[in-house]
Image (tube, rainbow, N blue to C red):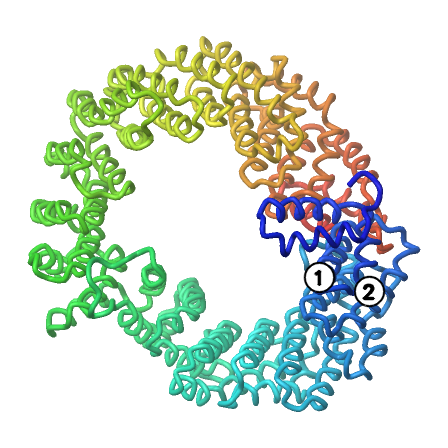
Amino acid sequence: MDGGKPSLPLVYQAVQALYHDPDPAGKERASVWLGELQRSMHAWEISDQLLQLKQDVESCYFAAQTMKMKIQTSFYELPQETHIALRDSLLSHIQNLKDLSPIIVTQLALAIADLALQMASWKGCVHTLIEKYSNDVTSMPFLIEILTVLPEEVHSRSLRIGSNRRTEIIEDLAFYSTTVVTLLMTCVEKSGSDEKMLIKVFRCLGSWFNLGVLDSNFMANNQLLMVLFQVLQRDETPTNLHEAASDCVCSALYAIENVDTHMPLAIQLFQGVLTLEAAYHMAVAREDLDKVLNYCRIFTELCETFMEITVRTPGQGLGDLRILELLLICAGHPQYEVVEISFNFWYRLGEHLFKMSDPGLHNVFRPYIQRLLHSLARHCQLDPDHEGIPEDTDDFGEFRMRVSDLVKDVIFLVGSAECFSQLYSTLKEGNPPWEVTEAVLFIMASIAKSVDPENNPTLTEVLEQVVLLPQTVHLAVRYTSIELVGEMSELVDRHPRFLDPVLHYLMKGLREKPLASVAAKAIHNICSVCRDHMAQHFQGLLDIARSLDSFALSTDAAIGLLKGTALVLARLPLEKIAECLSDLCSVQVMALEKDSSNGKSSDPTVWLDRLAVIFRHTNPIVENGQTHPCQKVIQQIWPVLSETLNAHQADNRIVERCCRCLRFAVRCVGKGSASLLQPLVTQMVNVYQVYPHSCFLYLGSILVDEYGMEEGCRQGLLDMLQALCMPTFQLLEQPNGLRNHPDTVDDLFRLATRFVQRSPVTLLSSSIIIHIIQCAIAATTLDHRDANCSVMKFVRDLIHTGVSNDHEDDFEVRKRLIGQAMGQHGQQLVTQLIHTCCFCLPSYTLPDVAEVLWEIMVFDRPTFCRWLESALKGLPKEMSGGAVTVTHKQLTDFHKQVTSAEECKQVCWAVREFTRLYR
């Protein structure tokens, strides 16, 4: 789009193709072309002309959306003197197009709102709009649309209006808020019970509640609140209107979260919601699930808002416990989706009560939690005609997992042991149908770990009974009983007499296809907790591991079994470990050898992952001076891994698994892998020149971590770093290279950081360090969580080596070298960090940036003060709309706060506050 302005017929043609071309390639071409048009300067004029011509819905929608996008992202392109003309033109478009299509009205309303927020010269925009349009009944719908999106856009992420302008706008909107509510009430009076208009009014009111600018006293006595509850009390309210009214009440409840400062409105809302109980029962009777869900949302929001008061003064005033009764009534609804809405509240209540640890309070809330648990157990029941095992990946399976998490979080209020016994007695005393038994066992499995295994006769009795369950019971009951056994591994560890019957029971499950994976998971649990007792059963584990694929196991279950086996293997006598490890690995090694001879056609990842888990968890206790028992095995396996790596070097997924396997092999034997160092590094570097997979950089960081302190290895590791850096820099220097390869950035700086930690002088004295620092400065702008974290950690640790005098001989050398590096790059680094904080990075990364600034300052405070002053001078002082972004006083205050800080968190706080001016 660098050429001249495209003609309108050409733009029409492209829009038509985008919506109506039967050929997907044609659609794609049109989409790319229109996208370029939207990014060009011509887009302003063309979209204005398309809206004026009003030819059809598609072209007007494209134009309205383009206008909104340009105002959001490219407002700086327009000179200030054009802003008034743009505003007037948009208002005339929305007036002319109001009947064409609601989605066009919304896009134009967003464009007008985004313009008003950025255009400092448009004072009192709410007042102007209401004055201009409120007397014309046909303009009412679009006026309300603008007034709905305006408060929503104040905190929009796509507008960086800065906190000074945002504060000014919020004060302005608060000033006119009563005018808006009065307008909405007039609207309701004029339109009577017109459903569409009421929905618009409630959406608009909710939007103003969400911004938190409505006056509580004014709202408490406002007719609109009455209308809202009347709509929710009426049985015949249509579904869409019911949802809009419910959303609005939820917004109001959320807005008064700090109840004490909004008392009059809080009382009105509290009493209003309590009147909805009868309406809830009517919706249940009519089987209107949509309305039932809406009421449950309202009841939950009520409980969330009044939670602190309820805990502070239970049963008194606004601490009325009837609100918990409302939630328990919802928990009694047969559809599990209803009770699920309230989960977050129960979590928060549990957490709150746990922190207060007041036995008196626990007694007040215990009966409510007991009733909740009772409902949850019922909701977890499978259908009586369900066949096979419980599914854990469908919606109901996910619901059961959430129940399990919630039960774990609130069980302390009831007492795990007591609850476990009660659940067991329901099974022991009655003869419930299978689906009740399975649900009870499921809840028991959730809490089994939190029951103290010391002297608990119920626990031992449950375990004795479960392992005797006949194979004739329903498959789902057997499945969940196996899960329960896996959760009781602590008990087995305390009472080893159970080990044989438990393993016998689990082995039966392992041999049955539907139960194999859950049985494998339980065996893994037993191995993890009962490592010493399981040593005598190692041969049995080895037999299972060697014939893994004869069982119908999921990938995770097979890996889990191998992990359990490796954990037990590590507890065998040292002299047995090598032979047993070799046996355990042999199946995977043979498969890899076969794979290599087959060429590229097969997929070795299964075997690589299995070897990786074995190396990762075989961690025997080796005294100093003893040879690591796994060393010999790993040396024997290396040629096979090397061959696999060669055969699949072009395939990133397989190479990644190879590197992961090697990483755990190196970690397993530590310095014992020295003989692999030379051939491994040579192979890594050779493959990386052709296929720059970032996992080689990661593997390099592991090698530096293990060998970087060894005098004899340092030069070799530095050569490796330099050889890996060259292709890496070429990759990252391509257009958008940093953004397109965040994994490479992450792994490169992980490697560089390891060098700083293990052998700083080697790195700082080398020629490569300058290029790494330059790359780091460029990469500070990268908005990618892991990559950015790695970059900041590298810079922080690098400077820190010149700050922390750890009384090593090389401290003075380090300090001198860091001084030289900072002399060259300090100003550029500080300027880039300040710019990055303000314009590129999300706020969660700011603590990392603050740590880097802190280290630079601790290294050389006077110089840092000059660098920071220069960086701040380069920041823009006002926005394109004319609003002041940052005052001179705010700049000098920030400089003073940072440079006088006595600890890092003060820098972090100052950076967080300052960057809000640009967000």
Q: Is residue 572 above or below residue 28?
A: above
Neighbourhood count class around disc 2 (C-alpha, 10 Å): few under 14, some 14–19, many 20 upward: many
Determine the CA span between mark 2 and mark 1: 14 Å
Q: Which residue is mark 1?
A: 61
Q: Quadrant of the N terminus?
A: top right
Q: Secondary structure at mark 2?
A: helix
Picture coordinates of residue 67, whole percent (x, y): 77, 57
Picture coordinates of residue 867, whole percent (x, y): 78, 32
Image quarter for residue 148? bottom right
Direction from residue 706 to residue 210 in the image, left or right: right
Between 221 and 497, the one nearer to me in the picture:
221
Direction from residue 799 to residue 385 in the image, left or right: left
Image quarter for residue 143? bottom right
Q: Secondary structure at mark 1?
A: helix
**Does residue 316 show up?**
yes
Direction from residue 412 to residue 544 in the image, left or right: left
Q: Which residue is mark 2?
A: 90
Residue 250 got which mark?
none
Q: Amino acid at mark 1?
A: Tyr
Q: Nearer the viewer, mark 2 or mark 1?
A: 1
Q: Is residue 813 above or below residue 549?
A: above
Picture coordinates of residue 112, whole percent (x, y): 78, 64
Q: Is residue 340 above or below residue 389?
A: below
